[in-house]
Image: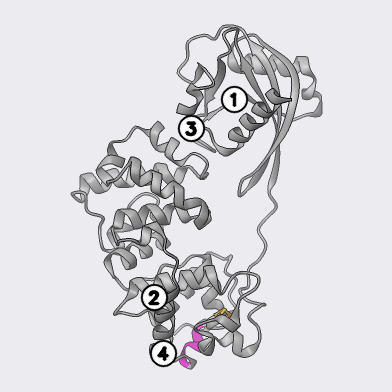
């Protein structure tokens, strides 16, 4: 037994499982991915729920399953349509990896998601948490599914004083789940831990008086629930200053650009954008030259219409938004002239959806 799990011996494991699972069976939220245990649906929902709130995910999940009802549909889909389905959810590598992995399931496993940790973990984008979630929820395999939420809950229940920001912490909590998990109903057990973290044992104000497992909770017994989990602060995020321009030609069509196929927001569409490295670059004439170099067409900037901020996990974008006009556009796959209506067909990440809103508001002023 790991030293960090010394409090396991204080827990009546059967009683803990019963209290947790009966609470879950009565109180769990009615979420669309809980309607059945289809591994594809569990998989899609778990990938969407990484870094994204449940309320936000629900409409995306329903639309995604509407557009790609089966793994065969997703495997065969055009990447632009897949990115469009994800538009606004962010962290687009998640859906690219999902599509790659689904193709592999089609080709290598005959369209059936593998049910062993060894095989499922080889699929692109399927980390230890997602593997455990699919195995336990869809296949009833008693495997841990440990994310930050579960680490917080268990660090309190077992009074574990390990820094959960450290990658090595996961092993401690996976071991804890292996000791605690119900072998009769691993699906409900893992989902109950997640649900407890979402509804009761929340980050800043755990509702201990309403908690179904309070009698088993070591942190509550010791009065230290607000001091756990231990989590060191993340490093500071980097600020990036950008200028972007909504540019139209004589016929009122807008120029848009496809971002490179790797790196941040890969293959998504944007308005022409320049990174500002020096205050002198904000001179209008100089900016026009930079936009011209980038778009390979004559650019005239009219005015600034607003400012957009977008926070990523590791950096913050500050975009100054210009409007202006362009001459004709040369032929290129990465640059397109589109009407306002046709713009709907292209997947724009959230910062550029905000830019578009700024532009639309400026038309009404
Ligand atoms: Fe969390 Fe409080 Fe319940 Fe312990 S008693 S699991 S700290 S909500």
Residue drawn at (32%, 42%), measured in percent from left and top? 68
Report the coloring of the rendering: one colour
Question: Ligand 1 is in which quadrant of the figure?
Answer: bottom right
User: First in sequence: mark 1 or mark 3?
Assistant: 1
For discs 1 and 2, the disc positioned in front in the rendered view: 2
Can residue 264 be seen at all in this image of the molecule?
Answer: yes
| Residue at disc 4, secondary structure | helix
User: What secondary structure predominates along the stretch shown in magenta?
Assistant: helix
Residue beneath disc 1: 271
Q: Which mark is residue 347?
A: 3
Q: Quadrant of the N terminus?
A: bottom left
Sort mark 3 into few (<14), some (14-19) or many (20+) by Cα contacts within 10 Å.
many
| Disc 4 residue crowd, few under 14, some 14–19, many 20+, Cα 10 Å | few
Q: Which residues are magenta?
A: 5-9
User: On screen, 33 above or below 248?
Assistant: below
The residue that label 2 is drawn on is 25
Sequence-wise, which precedes: disc 4 or disc 3?
Answer: 4
**Figure quadrant of residue 132:** bottom left
């Amino acid at each position: 037994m790991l030293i960090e799990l010394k409090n396991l011996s204080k827990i009546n494991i059967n009683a803990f499982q019963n209290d947790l699972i009966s609470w879950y069976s009565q109180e769990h939220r009615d979420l669309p991915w809980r309607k059945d245990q289809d591994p594809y649906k569990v998989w899609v929902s778990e990938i969407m729920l990484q870094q994204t709130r449940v309320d936000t995910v629900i409409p995306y999940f329903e639309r995604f399953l509407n557009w790609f009802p089966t793994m065969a549909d997703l495997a065969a889909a055009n990447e632009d349509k897949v990115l469009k389905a994800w538009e606004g959810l962010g962290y687009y590598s998640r859906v690219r990896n999902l599509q790659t992995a689904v193709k592999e399931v089609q080709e290598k496993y005959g369209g059936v998601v593998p049910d062993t940790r060894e095989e499922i973990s080889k699929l692109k984008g399927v980390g230890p948490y997602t593997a455990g979630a699919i195995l336990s929820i869809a296949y009833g395999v008693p495997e841990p599914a440990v994310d930050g939420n579960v680490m917080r809950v268990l660090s309190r229940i077992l009074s574990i004083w390990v820094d959960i920001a450290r990658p090595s912490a996961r092993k401690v909590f996976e071991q804890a789940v292996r000791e605690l998990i119900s072998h009769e109903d691993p699906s409900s057990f893992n989902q109950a831990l997640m649900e407890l973290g979402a509804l009761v044992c929340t980050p800043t104000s755990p509702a201990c008086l309403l908690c179904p497992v309070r009698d088993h909770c070591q942190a509550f017994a010791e009065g230290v629930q607000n001091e756990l989990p231990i989590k060191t602060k993340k490093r500071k995020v980097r600020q990036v200053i950008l200028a972007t321009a909504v540019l139209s030609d004589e016929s009122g069509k807008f120029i848009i650009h496809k971002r490179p196929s790797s790196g941040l927001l890969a293959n998504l569409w944007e308005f022409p954008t320049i990174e500002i490295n020096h205050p002198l670059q904000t001179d209008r004439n100089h900016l026009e030259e930079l936009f011209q170099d980038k778009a390979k067409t004559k650019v005239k900037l009219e005015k600034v219409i607003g400012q957009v901020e977008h926070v990523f996990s590791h950096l913050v974008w500050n975009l100054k938004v210009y409007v202006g006009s362009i001459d004709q556009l040369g032929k290129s796959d990465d640059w397109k002239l589109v009407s306002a209506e046709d713009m709907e067909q292209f997947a724009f990440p959230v910062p550029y959806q905000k830019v578009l809103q700024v532009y639309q508001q400026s038309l009404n002023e």
